[in-house]
Amino acid sequence: MLTCHASSAASATTTGVAGTDGCWFDLVGGDAGERTQVEAATGLRLPDREHLGGIELSNRVGIAGDVLRLGIPYFSPDDDVAPSPVGFVLTQRYLVSLRYAPSPAFDLAAERVRAAAAGTSTDAFVTLVQSIVGSAADRMEAVAAEVGTLSTRIFDSGRRNTALLRSTLAEIGRVETRLARLRLSATGLLRLVLALREEAPAWFGKPALAHLHAAQKDLDVLCEFDSQLTDKLQFLLDAVLGFINIDQNDVIKILTVASVVSIPPVILAGIWGMNFDRMPELHAPHAYPLALVAIALSIVLPLLWFKRRNWM
């Protein structure tokens, strides 16, 4: 899908706006016909998905004359969407964005650009960066809330049964996946902003650089917050695994006590069950009840010993 946001109109197709300054072409997907249309309208050569997905710095930031080619190899537009590359081709007259999935941040930036009703390609790019940063901050706050909920479930839930621990372990994995996707997006955008601040051409303008500096500070804060959430998730993961290990140890302890306690009565029953001719205790008065008492004591005394030593 191709959308054009022009300084002279809220929204238009590429037809009739090829010479308009401040035009933002937003290309979603890899439709060859639309790519050709944008290249014809702008005179720019657009990078393909394979090039945008490269992790080399040369693939992320490239400057050829007055043309800036920028890329984020792993961009997660939403929690339920797998990461995909995002690219930007920026000149003094045009901004072309290339992406392969819907993005609320891009939609918000488009609304802001239309509301401004006038501006340059640089203004559109700065607005887009600010929208991406704001969206990442909102999503990271949502992740922080989920981490807090997980912490409460783990430590304040009273009885922690195996089913609860297993579901919590799976939830920690899902939250960590969301956080990892956010981390890739934020760090990719941060590297892009840092490189652009150092190598931006003169036409980029000081106001735009000032906005990028503010975005850089926000991204630094997000990266620091991400580090804190990662440490917290690791702590929760260790706690859940620790509780599971404790439950396993309790089961092993019960089995050990049961096996040890059962040894004396088995020995006594085995001895008295022997069919020898000379076993005088078998002919004693009340031999049977005395044998039962001895077997019971052989069970109770080890249990009392384990209890006294706090082994059970």
Image (cartoon, rainbow, N blue to C red):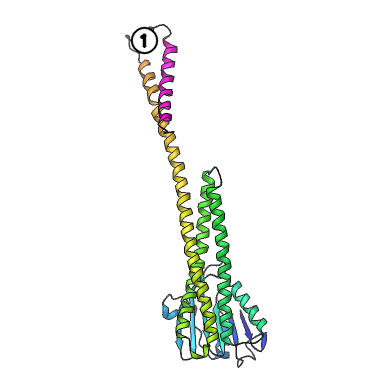
- Residue 29 makes an appearance in the image: no
* Residue 202 belongs to magenta span: no
Residue at x 44% of width, y 16% of height: 293
Please tell me how many numbered marks the rendered image carries.
1
Q: Quadrant of residue 21?
A: bottom right
Is 160 placed above or below 54 here? above
104 to 286, vertically: above or below: below
Q: Which residue is mark 1?
A: 281
Identify residue type, mark 1: Glu
Q: Is residue 238 left or right of residue 41?
A: left
Residue situated in front as seen by the camera: 59 or 227: 227
Quarter holding the C terminus is top left
Which element carries disc 1, helix, strand or loop? helix
- Residue sitting at x 41%, y 6%: 285
Q: Main secondary structure of the magenta part?
A: helix
Which span is picked out in magenta? 287-310
